[in-house]
Amino acid sequence: LSSEEGKKKANMSSLGAIYFVKKENTDAKLEVKKKRERKLDIIDENVKQETEKVRDVFNEYETFQVEKFAKIRKLCEQGGDNLDWSKLRIDEDDVLDLAMILSELPPKLKIFDLSSTVVEDHAFVNLMISLKTQRATLRHLRLNGSQCGFIARASLLQLMRGFHQLEEIKLVKFVGLGAELKKFLNNVADLEVSRFKLVACGLKPNDYKLFKRFFVSRHCQLVEFCLENHGINNESIALLCEGLSTNTSLRKFSLKTENLSLTAVETINEVIQVQTYLEILCLQKCCVNSDAFLILCTGVILNDTLRYFDLRYNMISDAICQNLQSALGNRTHLTNSFLKIDLGGNQITNRLSKQPVHIEGVSLLLEDDEVE
């Protein structure tokens, strides 16, 4: 009996231990389950909060877009006939909004300037389509094509064909323009454009042959031509000057390039001597040095029509001051001409400010402020 009772007690103890272990395991599982549920609750709460934040941001964005669209519309309506946004920062959505608004406005714009605004291809195409409503009144068109491909340039050509007249076209960073340059120049001639400006359009040497033909053509009505392009070589300058030498409509020629060689300067000087219609010549930021300046002076003293000669931001040094009187003094025999030579941004201004040089018929300007 004692043995059997001992066995029973041992069995009871084992069962109690098993029960206790099972109870511990059950409690542990329940605790783990509760922890998981608490974590899920926290996650659900975070998701709910983030969803509300996203919803708030979306609502704010929608409100902002509506307000911005209304603001753009107000700018368009209050801007009168001048939509000059060249100094405003606007994104692609703004351009799309602008295109939609312009398509609804009656013809009234005379100036449209987005020359400092980068516009993607599809937004540019939409903009060109919307500007068709403004053809009757638009006279000044200034655009930036740094992100524009063939389709965008084609949409610009299509827009230009529908105009009866344009006074000014300014194209900035239309890098692939050379492929359609002939078509653009034909449109410029047909529309009797008087001011044509090309800035950093990546023109190739062969493109200047088209400019030569354009300038000698009787259809050219340009009064002002401005070209800013890097890497213009001597051959390109020669082609340009060959066309300019016989042109009778041009009154202002502006060139900005880097490292204008002495050969190119001599070619320009030959044009100055024979061109009897040009009134304003700008060679800003062309790396014109003192030797090149003296060469140009030999042409200037023979020209009776030139009124303003812009040589700002070049490399003309103080050493030229002692030769300035003799270089330009021979111009005094031209009775019908008074010439302004702008030397702002050159080293020469340091000495001329202290020791002014007086030359009859010539006014030397020394301001450093850059003016377009």
Image (cartoon, rainbow, N blue to C red):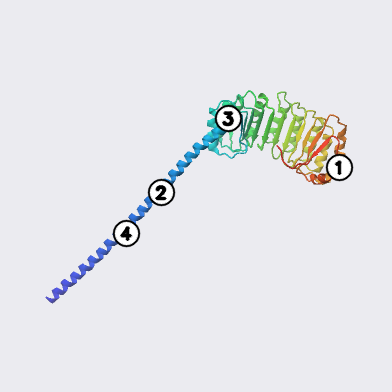
Mark found first going from the N terminus, 1 or 2: 2
Instruction: Examine the rendering and report whether any part of residue 151 can be seen.
Output: no
Pair 4/3: label in front:
4
Identify residue for label 1.
323
Mark found first going from the N terminus, 3 or 2: 2
Identify residue for label 2.
49
Pair 2/4: label in front:
2
Q: Position of residue 340 (x, y in %)?
A: 79, 36
Image position of 297 with respect to 129: above or below: below
Identify residue for label 4.
32
Mark found first going from the N terminus, 3 or 1: 3
Question: Residue farthest to the bottom?
Answer: 2
- Left or right, 77 with respect to 33, comes to right
* Residue 172 falls in image quadrant: top right
Secondary structure at numbered mark 3:
helix
Q: In the image, what residue type sits under mark 1?
A: Asn
Mark found first going from the N terminus, 4 or 3: 4
Q: In the image, what residue type sits under mark 3?
A: Ser
Identify residue for label 3.
155
Image position of 70 with respect to 42: above or below: above
Mark found first going from the N terminus, 1 or 4: 4
Q: CA distance from mark 3 to mark 1?
A: 53 Å
Q: CA distance from mark 1 to mark 2?
A: 79 Å
* Residue 125 falls in image quadrant: top right
Pair 1/2: label in front:
2
* Quadrant, the N terminus: bottom left
Nearer to us in this view, 269 or 126: 126
- Which residue appears at 87% of the width and 37% of the height? 329
Q: Position of residue 240 (x, y in %)?
A: 74, 32
Pair 3/2: label in front:
2
